[in-house]
Image (cartoon, grey):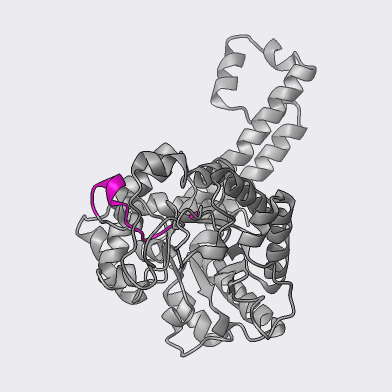
C-alpha cells in the first residue's frame, strides 16, 4: 500500500480529533465526552469543580487546548509513522540530488520521470545545485511539480533544499539566470557588528528562496573562524569572536524563519579552526573537548536553544576531544554525546555531504550511512552512491546492526518538522 493511501486514514483520524476538541470547547459540560479523570470526579460527587468557573476555568481550558494541539501533532506523527513500511522510513533519512533517484544527467525539470522516482524512493529531501537552476520560471515550475508529486505520493511535504549562504556560496544569487540580491559574505556582515544586518540577510535569502519553492536553506554558517589559514570557511564565517558569531547566527535564523524558510546551523562542531578541507580529504581540529565547549560550540548551543530546525554535523576529526580520528558525523560522542545530551537538542541532525573526500575516500556509501545513523544522525546528505547507502540501511536493520526503533526515532523528528510546514 502506498504511503498516500495509508495516510488518508491518518488524516481522517486527525480531523476527527480536531472536531472533538472544538465541540468540547463549545458545548455544556453535561454534553461533553469526558476524559476518564473527569468521569471519576463526577462519580465522586465533585460536579462543582466543573461548574466553578471564572478566569481560573478559562485559564485551565486554554492550557488544555494548547496541550491538545501539541498532542494532536504527536498523534499525527505516530499515525503517519505507523502507516509506513521499513523501506519508506529508510527513504525518509536521505536528502539527495535529484539525479541520484532519476538517473538523469542534469535535472532541470520535474515530470513523469521525477514522479516515478519519488514513488520508488520517497526520499526525505532533495538538494539542488547551481546546474539544476536555469531561471526563475524554470525553477518555480520544477520545484512546484516536485512538491505536488510528493504530496500526492506521501501525503506530507518533501524538503526542497539549497546551499544559499550569500557571497561565495550562492546557488541562486550567484547564478546569471536570476536577478536577486546577493547578501554578500557573512564576514562583512559580522565586521559591521550589527545583528540587524544578519536578520536582514536571513529575510532576504528566505524571501526569494520561498518564492522559488524552496523550504530549507543550509544556512547559517555557525563556525567561529579561529584559524586564519582556514580555506574552507574563510569569509563564510561571521568572525573569530564566538559571542559575535552567536548573535549573528541567531539573528539570521530569525530572519530565515520569519520569511518562512527552515534553517540549518553548520558545520558542527566548528569548521573554522581546522586544518585541511573535508571536501578533499582528512581535516581535523586539535582542540580538546573543553576548548571546543568554550569557543566553537557556543553558537551551536545557542542555535539549539533557539530551536533551529536542523544542525549539520561536519566530517572533521577531533582526536583530542574524542580520542580517535572518527569523523564527527560518525562519532557517537559528537552526535549523541554533545548534540543530543550536552546541548539538549532534539531537532534534526543532518550530515554534511557524504560524497566529500573525507568520507568517500575512507568508507563505502553503505558503511558511511550505517555508521552515521549509529552515531545518532537523522538525515544523510548526498551519499556518493544513494542506492548502495539505502540498501545498506535496510540490510543493517535486517541483521540487527541498526534497530527499527532507531530509524523510527529519526523519522519522528523529520515528520514533526514536515507536518508543520
Can you see residue 65? yes
Span colored in magenta: 311-324
179 left or right, relative to 72 = right
Residue sitting at x 23%, y 52%: 324
Residue sitting at x 32%, y 68%: 358
* Spot occupied by residue 165 in the image (x, y as percentages of width and height): 60, 66
Q: Nearer the viewer, residue 238 or 404?
A: 238
**Which residue extends farthest top?**
45
287 left or right, relative to 57 = left
* Spot occupied by residue 252 in the image (x, y as percentages of width and height): 65, 54
**Which residue extends farthest bottom?**
105
Q: Quadrant of residue 21?
A: top right
* Spot occupied by residue 290 in the image (x, y as percentages of width and height): 37, 38
Task: Say above or below: 370 vs 69.
Answer: below
Which quarter of the image is occupied by the N terminus?
Answer: bottom left
Number of marks in the image?
0
Q: Nearer the viewer, residue 294 or 264?
A: 294
* Spot occupied by residue 72 in the image (x, y as percentages of width and height): 58, 43
> Was residue 322 drawn as part of the magenta stretch in this picture?
yes
**Which residue extends farthest right?**
54
Task: Say above or below: 377 vs 355.
Answer: above
Task: Say above or below: 59 vs 8.
Answer: above
Residue sitting at x 58%, y 27%: 35
Q: Nearer the viewer, residue 376 or 245?
A: 245
Task: Say above or below: 120 vs 242.
Answer: below
Which quarter of the image is occupied by the C terminus?
Answer: bottom right
> Was residue 220 drawn as part of the magenta stretch in this picture?
no
Q: Quadrant of residue 372?
A: bottom left
Can you see residue 389? no
Amino acid at each position: 500500500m502506498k504511503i498516500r493511501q495509508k495516510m488518508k486514514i491518518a488524516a481522517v483520524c486527525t480531523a476527527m480529533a480536531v472536531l472533538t476538541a472544538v465541540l468540547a470547547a463549545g458545548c455544556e459540560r453535561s454534553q461533553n465526552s469526558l476524559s476518564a479523570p473527569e468521569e471519576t470526579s463526577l462519580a465522586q460527587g465533585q460536579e462543582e469543580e466543573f461548574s466553578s468557573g471564572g478566569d481560573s476555568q478559562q485559564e485551565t481550558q486554554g492550557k488544555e487546548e494548547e496541550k491538545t494541539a501539541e498532542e494532536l501533532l504527536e498523534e499525527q506523527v505516530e499515525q503517519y509513522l505507523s502507516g509506513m513500511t521499513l523501506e519508506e522510513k529508510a527513504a525518509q533519512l536521505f536528502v539527495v540530488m535529484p539525479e541520484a533517484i532519476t538517473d538523469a544527467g542534469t535535472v532541470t525539470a520535474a515530470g513523469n520521470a521525477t514522479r516515478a522516482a519519488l514513488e520508488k524512493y520517497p526520499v526525505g529531501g532533495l538538494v539542488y545545485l547551481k546546474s539544476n537552476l536555469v531561471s526563475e520560471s524554470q525553477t518555480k515550475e520544477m520545484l512546484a511539480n516536485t512538491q505536488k508529486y510528493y504530496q500526492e505520493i506521501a501525503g506530507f511535504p518533501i524538503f526542497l533544499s539549497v546551499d544559499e549562504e550569500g557571497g561565495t556560496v550562492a546557488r541562486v544569487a550567484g547564478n546569471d539566470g536570476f536577478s536577486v540580491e546577493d547578501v554578500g559574505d557573512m564576514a562583512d556582515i559580522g565586521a559591521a557588528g550589527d545583528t540587524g544586518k544578519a536578520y536582514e540577510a536571513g529575510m532576504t535569502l528566505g524571501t526569494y528562496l520561498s518564492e522559488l519553492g524552496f523550504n530549507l536553506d543550509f544556512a547559517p554558517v555557525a563556525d567561529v573562524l579561529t584559524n586564519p589559514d582556514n580555506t574552507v570557511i574563510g569569509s563564510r564565517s561571521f568572525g573569530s569572536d564566538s559571542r559575535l558569531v552567536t548573535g549573528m547566527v541567531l539573528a539570521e535564523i530569525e530572519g530565515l524563519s520569519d520569511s518562512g524558510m527552515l534553517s540549518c546551523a553548520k558545520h558542527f562542531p566548528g569548521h573554522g579552526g581546522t586544518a585541511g578541507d573535508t571536501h578533499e580529504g582528512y581535516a581535523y581540529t586539535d582542540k580538546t573537548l573543553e576548548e571546543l565547549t568554550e569557543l566553537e560550540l557556543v553558537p551551536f548551543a545557542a542555535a539549539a536553544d533557539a530551536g533551529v530546525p536542523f544542525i549539520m554535523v561536519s566530517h572533521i576529526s577531533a582526536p583530542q576531544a574524542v580520542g580517535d580520528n572518527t569523523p564527527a558525523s560518525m562519532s557517537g560522542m559528537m552526535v549523541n554525546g554533545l548534540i543530543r545530551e550536552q546541548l539538549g537538542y532534539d531537532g534534526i541532525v543532518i550530515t554534511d555531504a557524504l560524497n566529500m573526500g573525507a568520507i568517500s575516500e575512507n568508507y563505502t556509501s553503505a558503511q558511511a550511512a550505517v555508521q552515521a545513523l549509529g552515531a545518532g544522525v537523522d538525515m544523510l546528505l548526498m551519499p556518493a552512491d544513494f542506492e548502495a547507502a539505502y540498501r545498506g540501511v535496510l540490510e543493517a536493520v535486517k541483521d540487527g546492526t541498526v534497530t527499527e526503533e532507531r530509524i523510527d526515532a529519526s523519522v519522528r523528528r523529520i515528520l514533526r518538522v514536515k507536518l508543520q510546514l
